[in-house]
Each structure stands twice: as structure tokens, then as C-alpha cells.
Image: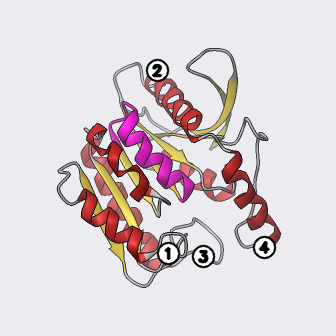
Amino acid sequence: MGDFTPITTLEGDAQFDAYVATPDGEATAAIIVIQEIFGVNEGIRQKCDSWAKAGYLAYAPDLFWRIEPHIELDADVPEEMQQALAYIPKYNQDQGIRDIEATIKAARAALGGTGKVGVVGYCLGGRIAFMSACRTDGDAFVGYYGVGIDGLLGEQHGIGKPTMLHIPTKDGFVPPETQKAMHDGLKDNRHVTLHDYEGLDHGFAAEMGNRRVEDAAKLADQRTADFFAESLA
């Protein structure tokens, strides 16, 4: 259903690839799917394909292209998990947000310049989705188990569009005190909705693999689908 397409950076000095899935009919809105630390792997591509089946134009930009293009790793393989974790300190998140902004720009152009663009991310991508809500002109934002969002709360004044966060309460990368800081810090922000998933761990909504918890993943994904249907109409 999809294939990789080059996106030009905001500076116009380079290009990076994004997996793009196109619906059968005319799309009126787009979804930017932000990868985990495992690259634009089969699971992320499947998420794009699912959005395309739902009628959206879907993009998954290659976040790590400056480090190594087209990284594809498996969270269920211990050696590949360690390899993925090693990419995090090498990744420049400020540059990454500009790449998301460039992808939003490309998606809007593909929609004829007037369509709305949603952003959804997972793990590192969940953090980048929150940063995108604070810093980009996307139209709606969803973060699944975003890491370190408590350290970004000072930027929330920049959030002017609907934003949703999915928070598993037993997330090994997001301890209870961080979750509390997120709830306390965002409770008065009228643009932000938080959903807790009791007893679940990081990665519960992965498209495939051992981390997925089917019922919870379907619940979170339905909430996301309903959220985008309303916010991007």
C-alpha cells in the first residue's frame, strides 16, 4: 500500500525518506506516524497502512536518518533492543522536530495546502509528538508512552491544538513519579487529555511482537481514531 518517498528538510539542504501510505480514495487529512527507537520497521509501516485504510494519507519519517538511514530493529531481540537504546543519545531531538515540521509541510502540500495534519508517536515518538504539540503547526497530537515528558512541561504554553497522551501505569521507562508530574502539570491545560492504562507496561500498543496487549491496544487505538476523526474533520 505504501512506499518510501523523499522529504526535503526545512532548510532545503538535504532530504530524508518517509514511508507514505495512500488511501484508495481522496484523502482530506493526513497522519504523521512517529517511530519508536526501532526505526520505521514493519510495525510502524503497518500503522501507516491502517491509517490509509481509514482514509488518511499517512507518513512515517525516518527519524534517525542523520545517524544511519533506514534502521529497522526488533524490540523482542535483546541485541537489537540494546542497539536501539544506543541511538537515543546520538539523536538530536531539536533537529528531529524540524524534520516532523518538514513532514507536516509535505503532507499539507500533498493535500492541496488546506488539509489538516495529525501527529501520533510511540515511545521516543511519543515524546516527539508532545514536543511537536508545543512547537509545530500540526492540528492534533497523540503520544503513546512518551518518555521524559515531565521535563518538557515548561513548554506546554505552546500547545494550542488538541493533544492526547496514553500512559501505561507500569511503564518501565516512565516511573510513577514522572506519571504524577505529567498529571499534575497538565491537569489545567484545556487542550490536553490523558488516559491511564492500569498495570500495563511500555509498548503495549506495538503493532506486533511480545509487548502488545491486544485489548488495551485496541482501546487506545480506538480512542486515537475517534480523537483524530473529531480533531481533523
User: Which numbered disc, 4 or 1, marks the residue that appears first in the sequence?
Assistant: 4
On the image, numbered disc 1 is attached to which residue? Answer: 171
Kindly report the distance in space between the C-alpha atoms of the residues bearing marks 4 and 1: 18 Å
Who is closer to the viewer here, 96 or 31? 96
Reply above or below: 35 against 65.
below
Q: Determine whether the residue tagged by mark 1 lies in a helix, strand or loop.
A: loop
Residue type, mark 4 in image: Pro
First in sequence: mark 4 or mark 2? Answer: 4
Q: How is the image coloured?
A: secondary structure
Q: Earlier in the sequence, mark 3 or mark 1?
A: 1
Q: Is residue 214 magenta?
A: no
Of badges 4 and 2, the one in the foreground is: 4
- Whole-angstrom CA distance, mark 2 to mark 3, is 36 Å
Q: Which mark is residue 78?
A: 4
Residue 55 in view of the camera? no
Q: Secondary structure at mark 2?
A: helix
Q: Residue at x 25, y 65 (%)?
A: 184
Extreme right residue here? 79
Residue 172 in the image: state x and y as whole percent.
54, 76
Residue type at numbered disc 3: Arg
Q: Is residue 205 above or below residue 24?
A: below
Amino acid carrying label 2: it is Ala
Q: Disc 2 designates what residue?
A: 109
Q: What's drawn in magenta, residue-wise?
A: 123-140
